[in-house]
Image (spheres, rainbow, N blue to C red):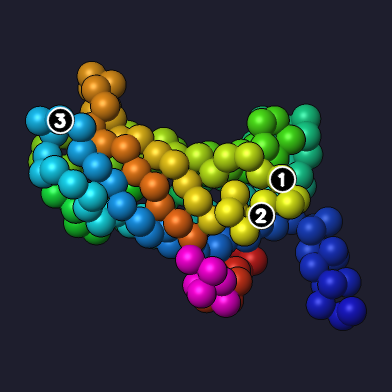
Amino acid sequence: MKKINELISNMTKRDIGFRIDEVMTGHHEFEKNCGPKGRLFMEFRGQWGPDDLRNWINPASEVFFKQKLSGTVTVEGLCRDVPMTGELALNYFKDASIKYSFEFKARQKGYCYVGQKVNIKPWNLLFSHTTCFGRITEKKTGKLVSTSVVYFKLLSLPKFLASLKLV
């Protein structure tokens, strides 16, 4: 109870936020003439969280359930552990989805990734909160490069929760 009172007291004195580390692992497939054929490894490791919880939980705020996302991405056949930056939007009330969007560079080109966990409903959380369908496009042209399915592995849940820290 002391920790909760301390947290509430701190929230009234200054902005308080959090950070959490998430790993999404799976596969991708290049479009024709964009890379090697077949299912290839893909993974992104990101840190996300709001800087100001009061604005983050306020439905009238521009940053309602949105936060910065940064980390690294590996797309077999394209890049390995390159920096990425973007945004994570928890669109629970808008369209029952979680949207990851970030940019990265590989082979002297800019790329955009947009992925979504869709159909977020109480009865399918084990699937909807763990499966993300995505697309990689060239930043300059918008050309589709690859489609992907990445997963939050439930075995990583303890590590995910342990990474939570207040900022």
Under circle 3, the secondary element is loop
Residue under label 1, please give it: 121
Q: Return the disc, 3 or 2, that comes first in the chain's sequence.
A: 3
105 relative position to 51: left or right: left
What residue appears at the point 34 percent right and 43 percent down from the top-left corner? 148
Q: Main secondary structure of the magenta part?
A: helix
Residue in the picture at 50% in, 72% down: 156
Q: Is residue 35 visible?
A: yes
Q: Under tag 1, what secondary structure?
A: loop
Q: Which residue is mark 2?
A: 125
- Residue under the image location 28 percent in, 21 percent down: 142
For the residues labelled 1 and 3, the Cα–Cα distance comes to 35 Å
Question: Residue 85 placed where, x, y %?
Answer: 38, 45
Residue 157 within the magenta-colored segment of the rendering = yes
What segment carries the magenta color?
153-158
Q: Which residue lies at the image location 78% right of the left edge and 30% below the top edge?
A: 60
Mark 1 residue type:
Lys
Q: Badge 3: few (under 14), some or many (20 or more) residues near its Cα, within 10 Å?
A: few
Residue 66 visible in the picture: no
Depicted 50 relative to depicted 102: above or below: below
Residue type at numbered disc 3: Lys
Q: Is residue 13 above or below residue 105?
A: below
Residue at the top extreme? Answer: 141
The residues tagged by marks 2 and 1 sit, at their Cα atoms, a distance apart of: 6 Å
Q: Which quadrant does the C terminus fall into?
A: bottom right
Query: Is the C-beta separation of discs 1 and 3 under 8 Å?
Result: no
Number of dots carrying numbers: 3
Element carrying mark 2: helix
Q: Nearer the viewer, residue 42 or 100?
A: 42
The residue that disc 3 covers is 32
Relative to residue 140, is residue 129 drawn left or right?
right
**Front-lying residue, 85 or 161:** 161
